[in-house]
Amino acid sequence: MTRRLAQVHERVAAACTATGRRTDEVRVLLASKTMDVATVRAALLADAGARAAGSGTAPVLLGENRVQELVAKAPALVDLGPTWHVIGPLQSNKVNAALRWASAVQSVADDALAQRLSDRVRERDVPLDVWVQVNVSGEPTKHGASPDVAADLGVRVAALPGLRLVGFMTVGARSDDTAVVRAGFARLRDVRDEVVGSGAPGTADARGLSMGMSGDLEAAVAEGATVVRLGTAVFGERPPQEGPHR
Ligand SMILES: *Cc1c(COP(=O)(O)O)cnc(C)c1O
């Protein structure tokens, strides 16, 4: 685990260097779906060990697609104090359970969920970090707002009480053509630039771009990713029986 995690950080660093970016501009999020608590714990310990040894990297974030998995794993890892993000579709009846553990929701794709989250957290002292998920490839199996409406959605989400819009998230196109994948990531960046450039209330912090996974992180970093979400590169292949999580 220590080795794979180090390799992942090296890949990110190399991708940054190749495109003239600083390595500390890109945070690694571990997508831990289907991995058991012991495996996730091992990854967190490997990360802590690397930092103690002077890796200079920021602590990894953790991401779960399914609230059931989040609530199953998070309590067993509180001693390590990880930061959890929801990275899959969030049903309204699971919002309360998710917010017990997650400090950010990356998968806000419509007004209804944004409103629900706002209603739930508006009395809090600290705002909830949210990302608007955009389906840049238009593939029907993928979650996310259409790129055509994503900027307007972002502006509305940013204005909701209790929420802090921190950026935009996407799952890249399933394509072997790097140009296609990169164009999708560039589209997400355009949405981000439009929202931040609007100067609308609450949009100033919306600079994040969560994009890039094990197979396409280099393309994502080249297009400006600030968070890359990695599963297989760190944990190895997932069991084949799992359904689509995207
Ligand atoms: C599984 C998953 C990832 C990680 O995918 P890998 O290809 O295993 O790196 C990233 N983001 C989301 C939303 C995922 O569901």
Image (cartoon, rainbow, N blue to C red):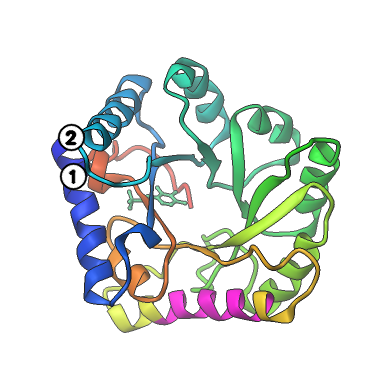
The vertical placement of 133 against 76, above or below, is below
Q: Position of residue 18 (x, y in %)?
A: 22, 75
**Residue visible at 59% across and 62% down in the picture:** 167
For mark 1, does the 10 Å Cα neighbourhood hold few (<14), some (14 to 19), or many (20 or more) residues?
some
Q: What residue range appears in magenta?
A: 183-195
> How many numbered circles does the render carry?
2
- Tell me the element at label 2: helix
Q: Amino acid at mark 2?
A: Thr
In reply to whether residue 184 is colored magenta, the answer given is yes
Q: Is residue 134 above or below residue 73?
A: below
Quarter occupied by residue 90 = top right
Helix, strand or loop at label 1? It is: helix
17 vs 246, left or right, is: left
Q: Which residue is disc 1 drawn over? A: 6
Q: Position of residue 202 (x, y in %)?
A: 76, 63
In this view, the residue in front, 61 or 148, is: 61
Instruction: Using the image, tell me which numbered label, if any, was put on residue 2.
Output: 2
Type of secondary structure dominating the magenta stretch: helix
